[in-house]
Image (cartoon, grey):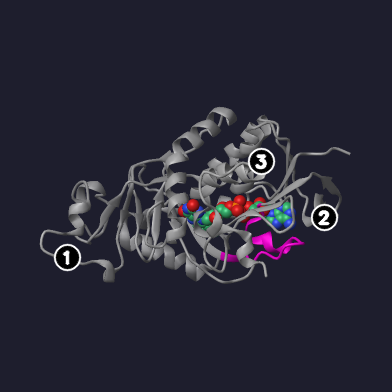
Amino acid sequence: MKNWDVIVIGGGIIGLSLSLELRKQGTSVLVVERGEPGREASSAAGGMLVDCSTETPPALQPLATASARMYPEFVHELQVESGLHVDLRDQGTIVFPPAEHVYERPGFKLETLLPAPLAKLEPALADPNRPAFYLKERSVDPRGLTAAALQAARKRGVDVSSGETVTSVRVSDGRVQGVVTKKTSFLAPKVVNCAGAWSGQISPCAFPTRPVKGQMLCLASPSRNLLKHVIRSPEIYIIPRSDGRIMVGTTLEEAGYDKRTDVDTIQRLLRSAIAMVPELRNAKILEDWAGLRPGTPDALPILGETATPGYYVATGHFRDGILLAPITAHLMAQVVEGFSTDHDLADFSPARFQQ
Ligand SMILES: Cc1cc2nc3c(=O)[nH]c(=O)nc-3n(C[C@H](O)[C@H](O)[C@H](O)COP(=O)(O)OP(=O)(O)OC[C@H]3O[C@@H](n4cnc5c(N)ncnc54)[C@H](O)[C@@H]3O)c2cc1C
């Protein structure tokens, strides 16, 4: 029976990026995926690379900053290796902050933090006088990104087994032997759980991950250059893609593993988008969907080795898994290969949830 150096459970952006990174170092890797790789949260995401936000937990800030810096190189490598184009945009984000955050004092106006008047930056916005500021953030098309990561992984010699649900990590004499699936088993001395919102369902570790549902819709822009920037406000975000599609999101719902969208929510998102950009009333809805973010009790990822030697975890990336994929792959490859890590991972240790 074939034996791999490492088995990665879950073919989302975290599992695929990590398997690529491990493979670069000559490690043989098998990705075991329940469905088709990249079809869960990683395809449902908006793709904003938010590296500086009041919503980013302070402990996560260094990883968010490092990962955002890695992005151009990360995408470049994926494009070269996969032969696929990934839509990475760097036009930046216009942020409309919550009313309570908008303050003015002599000599300070949020408008002065814009590189040009709002009406010039985004003529399609309904209210050119709303207080706003500009962030030099990038955005990426997550579906293109995961497709390129999968293709690159295959080309680099990562084995991928789709349609295999891992039920447990096999442990014998206190050491990992591989994984057991509903149909068969696979052998490896090291296993990394990258199963996203489902990570807690695989024994022997009960990681406290939970699904946090987000609904989104995709519009066909009535004109290709309607919007340049990502627009973020407390009620909604709007993410333009280079091919003229516009993503609108989202919700944060505690709804278990239910991935259905509901008409009222989608209509509410659409109304908010039209209130912000009136021309979108002429846009056609191409698609709507919901995805499940991997949430954790303290809103921090879980990264590191578990109490079972040889069993690792990289999950719980919640709202930032697309952003954090390059740094997670880099650091977790260091952990799995037994090297010291470039960043201190103590705040993300699985031990914080183990009694
Ligand atoms: C609506 C929405 C908007 C978002 N927007 C952004 C954004 O703008 N920017 C950002 O950075 N992040 C965003 N995110 C978050 C981001 O999508 C996630 O953090 C990220 O995709 C998590 O990646 P993952 O690989 O851990 O999980 P997933 O992509 O869910 O992958 C986990 C994989 O594991 C597989 N799996 C599960 N159980 C098993 C099992 N037992 N055996 C085998 N395989 C299994 C699943 O089938 C799945 O393919 C958003 C998420 C949502 C839902």
The range drawn in magenta is 194-212
Q: Name the residue tied to disc 3.
A: 337
> Does the image show residue 68?
yes
> Does the image show residue 286?
no
Q: Is residue 198 magenta?
A: yes
Does mark 1 have its CB less than 8 Å from ligand 1?
Answer: no
Q: Name the residue tied to disc 2.
A: 171
Q: Dot 2 lies on which element?
A: strand
> Which quadrant of the figure has residue 20?
top right
Q: Amino acid at mark 3?
A: Glu
Q: Is residue 231 magenta?
A: no
The quadrant of the picture showing ligand 1 is bottom right
Q: Dot 1, how many residues are within 10 Å of its Cα: few (below 14), some (14-19), or many (20+)?
A: few
How far apart are the alpha carbons under marks 3 and 1?
51 Å
Q: Which mark is residue 104?
A: 1
In this rendering, the answer to whether 83 lies above or below 342 is: above
Quadrant where the image shows the C terminus: bottom right
> Which quadrant of the figure has residue 330?
top right
Q: Dot 1 lies on which element?
A: loop
Q: Position of residue 220 (x, y in %)?
A: 44, 49
Does mark 2 have its CB less than 8 Å from ligand 1?
Answer: no
Question: Which residue appears farthest toward the left when viewing the image?
Answer: 106
Q: Position of residue 41 (x, y in %)?
A: 58, 55
